[in-house]
Image: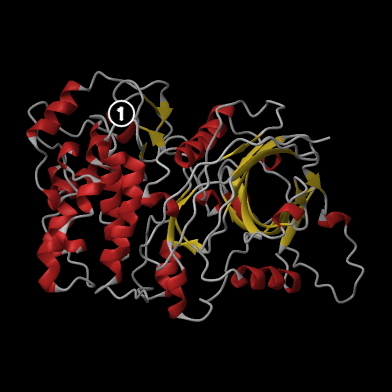
Amino acid sequence: MHHSRRFSSDEKWHSEASWQYSLAWPMFVACCLQNVAFLVGSHKPGQGLMAEQQVADDKCGDADEHRTLDPGESLSSQQTTMLRLPPYRSNIVSFISKLATSYPSHLQPCICTRSFTSSDPRHQSFKSSSAPVPESLPPNVPIDEEQLPRYRSEVYYPANPGDVLCEQYELKAKVGWGSTSTVWLAQDISSERLFKSNRFVALKICNSDAADEDTNHELDMNMHLSSVNSTHRGRAILGTAFEAFSIDSPQRSSHLALVFKPMREPLWLFRRRLGGQDKVTHLKLDNIMVTFEDESVIEDFVQSQAAHPMARKIVGERTVYRCHNNFGALKGGINTIRNMYPKITDFGLAQRGDQAGPLIHPIQPNDCHAPEVLLGTGWSYSADIWNFGIIVWDILTGQSLFQQERLYSASQHLADMIALLGPVPPAMLQRERDLRHWRWRPEVHNPEGKLSGNAAEFFGGPFFSDDGTFLHKDLIPSSRSLENELPECIPDAEADLFFAFMRRMLCWVPEERATAAELKLDPWLE
């Protein structure tokens, strides 16, 4: 008998939005600020989450796009308890705003007596002549997660279309993959869901080699977000897991499974559908997902899988499927975006700010690093405000403000900051000198594989001399300034307001950045 430990929460999802700049982009930014205000708690200690931790994972692909949360127990526990999370309702009147409040719930016991039903294609004969046969891929050509540098097949859950997990979720198609999991579209076939609207879910099935600390952290983040500040308007567009359970594979390895509302695609791909194809080069918008315009899109996709099943390869005792996550053009055309809205997802690397001591370990994707992260001066909730400024620029221009063509260089990153934002304030330089003796524990490997205990070692510093002179002046681009890089979608008449808005987020000194609550009132958004 397989036991599953799980938590869940039920979710019910209940003006024309144009993506022309004149209306939608400022409104979209304001909508996202609801999320930022909830996550960072407007800089109030203990009320928000931090930017993602960089060193814990080297994600690849699209699978780890959903982020999640934990009851704080070891996954090895054989308890069969379902923790019912505080659900939140969304009454989305338009794509951009109109977010509802939430209400609390309760704990409810649940036992899952059977977590795995096999439909392994190796054991299927495809007797029907009319049944389509999946395309067979060469076994010696790596696909999806097999292309990862440290790929080990035995740590991935051996999922197959038709498998039923926990007697409830029937797997339909692999829609994502990454270094720590695969993501599958599944149909809820349980009788208790007969009269509820969420027929399909996204299952993130984590690898069996994930440390208890890592899996518990991911669960904890979801539990935290689903249980605090339930009336905040930004909560409705956070893509947290509403259920989780552990499953045993036929090889008796244990895997954490997280259940999400299915998302259509990342925001960068959605943006590409609406124009700007030639400009989208290196966006960091993978963790902002867009909902489906209509659930019938999912149903059509599942039906198409029956006619055109995923290509597969069989290697020994394992079948690997090629990810199939293209849901096609918008159903009903561009007018259907009024039924869609963004969600921030994938909280597995999120950091809480109520930790002891200065937070100096590296966080954030490379081109999103805040100055205090590169200099090791200690980061807090304001790092998310810097992140948000970078994302706004990405959305409006189609490229990162600090994009680098070759291997990432922190020296070049700081040189670009100096060109765009001006010299580093003396206060920041003094902080860097004062905190040089602080080291994080445990030491972590930097991208070159060197064990590092502070920012200078991790990023290749020091970057400044003792008298505050930048040691890489030759890297400062003389042709760059923020005001010379006005996005094409911003009218000249609004340039001053726009740059003033950006400079409230992109500040050298973290304490000088506006809070999310303050940014919501910015004149550019009005």
186 with respect to 242 (left or right): right
- Which residue is found at the position 28% from the left and 36% from the top? 373
Asked whether the viewer can see residue 76, the reply is yes
Asked whether the viewer can see residue 206, the reply is no
Q: Quadrant of residue 137?
A: bottom right
16 with respect to 159 (left or right): left
Q: Residues within 10 Å of mark 1 (few under 14, many from 20)?
A: many
Q: Quadrant of residue 202?
A: bottom right
- Which residue is found at the position 17% from the left and 37% from the top? 511
Which residue is situated farthest in the top direction here? 437
Quarter of the image that includes the N terminus: top right
- Which residue is found at the position 44% from the left and 56% from the top? 343
- Which residue is found at the position 79% from the left and 37% from the top? 251
Closer to us: 47 or 479 = 47
Q: Quadrant of residue 32?
A: bottom left
Placement of 245 over or under 334, stated as above or below: above
- Name the residue that disc number 1 marks: 360
Placement of 130 over or under 175, stated as above or below: below
Quarter of the image that includes the C terminus: bottom left
187 with respect to 507 (left or right): right
Rendered location of residue 184, percent (x, y) = 65, 55
Closer to us: 78 or 372 = 78
SS under mark 1: loop
Rendered location of residue 235, percent (x, y) = 42, 49
Rendered location of residue 118, percent (x, y) = 83, 50
